[in-house]
Amino acid sequence: MSSPSAKGNDLYITAYTLSSALGNGNPATLRRLLSGAGGLTEYPLENEQVTWLGRIAEDDSDEPPVDLGPLDCVSNRLLAAAARRDGFQPAVARAVAKYGSNRVGCFVGTITAGLMHIEDCYRLNNPGGDDLGDDTRLDEVLNLFSPAECCQKLFGISGPAVTVSTACSSSAKVFAAAARHIRAGFCDAAVLVGIEAACDTIIYGFRSLGLLSTSPCRPWDRHRDGISVGEAAGFALIESDHAGFDDIGLLGYGESCDAYHMTAPHPNGDGAYAAIETALRRAGLDARDIDYINLHGSGTPANDASEDAAILRMFGDQVVCSSTKGWTGHTQGAAGITEAIICFMAMKNGFAPASLNTEVQDSGLRARVALKNQPFRIRNVLSNSFGFGGNNCALIFGEPR
Amino acid sequence: MKSVFVDSVAVIGSGGEANCHPRVRWAANGDQVRKSSGELRRASPVIRLVLQVTALHSDFASLDLSICRPVFTCSDGDMHVIDNICLALKTPGRPVSPTQFHNVVHNAAAGHWSLGVKSVAPSISISARYGSFAAGIMEAIGCLEEDGLPVLLVSYMHPGPPRLDKYRPRFRPFALSMLLQSERTPDTAFVLHTQLSGGERDTPVGDPDLERLRALNPAAKALPLLLAMAAGKETSIDLSLEYATLEVEIRQCLEPYARHGASIDAYAPA
């Protein structure tokens, strides 16, 4: 049930592109999703254990790489390569021509920005000493704003720019932050970005918590044992005006905080439930209006159990759900936009992607998780992203109203 | 132009310790705030600074801060945690500490705050490098327009360990906690009229020592605004973002409010 006031609040996603372990750009990603071949590969850890990673493939473009100057680092290179796909740059150029460059904002979600570069400075230079070498660019690379500055330059935009860094909900919350800035009149459109390279801080940090899967991650499976770390660079262009036939509506979003534990989720999924409830209210939709749910579904025992409880309480066990982290890995600060774009593909192509690698659902979890791709018409989708610090965000996308 | 109403401000850092406005509390050093709990002592210096400035604020804010929407803004990540993890990563076996990993996320300070006060309000943690404070005001305005809940804006920056800090000019810690509302209340101390404009400009402060702090610590870019508030002065200041300037005009509210009957328009800029 949509109310007129909710309709009037819709914003429009008018272009998007994703580079992840599933491929560089949307056509490659869709081919992999339809073929059933995930993107995770085995990765040896230092202590002879293994884990599985979702690495972005080498850029196969014929164009020479962009000179990033002092911003040069792995994550900004991934951004520059990904931005060239799927007509995204021309779409931003059209928005700049329409609204003016200072009316197009830039909202980036990331956890680590260029941290991998600083890890290298520690590792390569003067072991044990304090000299990190002569390439320790704190402001240009380590600073969380680095990818935002990089995108401002790549796209020639000078509207409000900010990095949102709320752990694994970062690039879901960029949709909410951009919506607030557009509604407050600070800009008319915005480039939304999620970027994460698989750096050792993330890989060995999750190992330290005992949350790193020893096989490709298996969300909701009875044998699930943790996450597979993934990389992604995702972009979406959001506008206050309808741009064309292919637009997707940002119908609602909801944010909440668990206030329960720094890394463990609330066992009853209270925070997740609150975020979903707010997103539905803002969208003017009922639970029954949601056709498919892209779960946060990180694959850790506690996270999946908590989210299952929230889903059951709000939707019961009939809405088709899946976690797509078995395809891409958990792309951390880029997970929100990665999974939003997979939702766009699901809507445009009429299928719910499988929860890849999930073989036998945990008997204690009752959400209706798709074990195979399921073809059906999807009008409205919910995408969940939850992060450390109990930071939750739920997004609802649908056909523009 | 967007207007936002300030209930109260707490500050930790050099600048305006003396002769403060009744709705501004300013401590030179976080350790003056209250006896540190065990949790505070174990926390990284960054998280400790945030918990100290919010504790200072909660002692006199006219609302329970736990009902506010937190907007946390800080230019850098926690450099102490980054240093600790990067050292672990070059040690055989790469023994990253789980506690350090909890705290490597930019929203660790916000997470510890929300856990401490049991706040379930939506929480955001952002960075806009040297424009982080002004970006926090803009996000706060967006939040206030979204649902009307009061916003707790916390802007902070603590130096890192010497190993990292030798690659940039040294600066001292600075943090502020500001309670913002979308409407005027009897407790409103100031109204800020804000406007984005082109170019990058900053209002300096007169004292050379404070000016150095303002120029080097992104959280201390609020100094000209805070000094005006503490002194009860009405003025306009510029806060550069990385792409534009946020112009902020400060008007007093406490005294005129006592006269009753005056509408908000009476405090709009001339």
Image (cartoon, grey):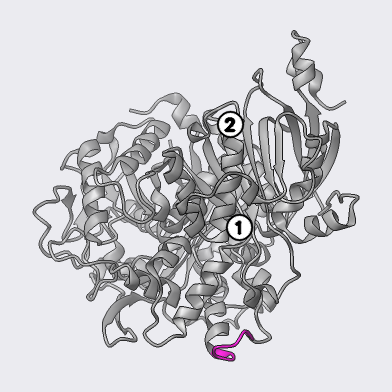
Residue A83 visible in the displayed image: no
Q: Amino acid at mark 2?
A: Glu
The N terminus of chain A, quarter of image: top left
- Residue A262 lies in the magenta-colored region: no
Which residue is at 78% across, 58% downward? B213
- Mark 2–mark 1 Cα distance, whole angstroms, equals 27 Å
Q: Is residue A113 positioned above or below B7 on the image?
A: below
Q: Is residue A319 positioned above or below A375 on the image?
A: above
Which residue is at 55% across, 83% downward? A122
Q: Is residue A357 positioned above or below A272 on the image?
A: below
Q: Quadrant of residue A327?
A: bottom left
Residue A39 drawn at (x, y percent): 31, 74
Q: Left or right: B84 with respect to B137? A: left
Residue matched to label 1:
A92
Residue B184 visible in the displayed image: yes
Which residue is at 17% across, 61% downward? A372
Residue A223 numbered tag: none
Residue matched to label 2:
B145
Decide which of A313, B37 is in the foreground and name it. Answer: B37
Q: Left or right: B177 with respect to B239? A: left
Give the letter of the chain under mark 2: B
Give the letter of the chain under mark 1: A
The stretch of residues the image draws in magenta is A124-132
Residue B55 drawn at (x, y percent): 56, 41
Q: Left or right: B146 with respect to B241? A: left
Residue A336 drawn at (x, y percent): 41, 56
Disc nearest the viewer among 2 and 1: 2
Prevalent SS, magenta region: loop
Q: Secondary structure at mark 1?
A: helix
Q: Contact, CB < 8 Å: mark 2 with mark 1?
A: no
The C terminus of chain A, quarter of image: top left
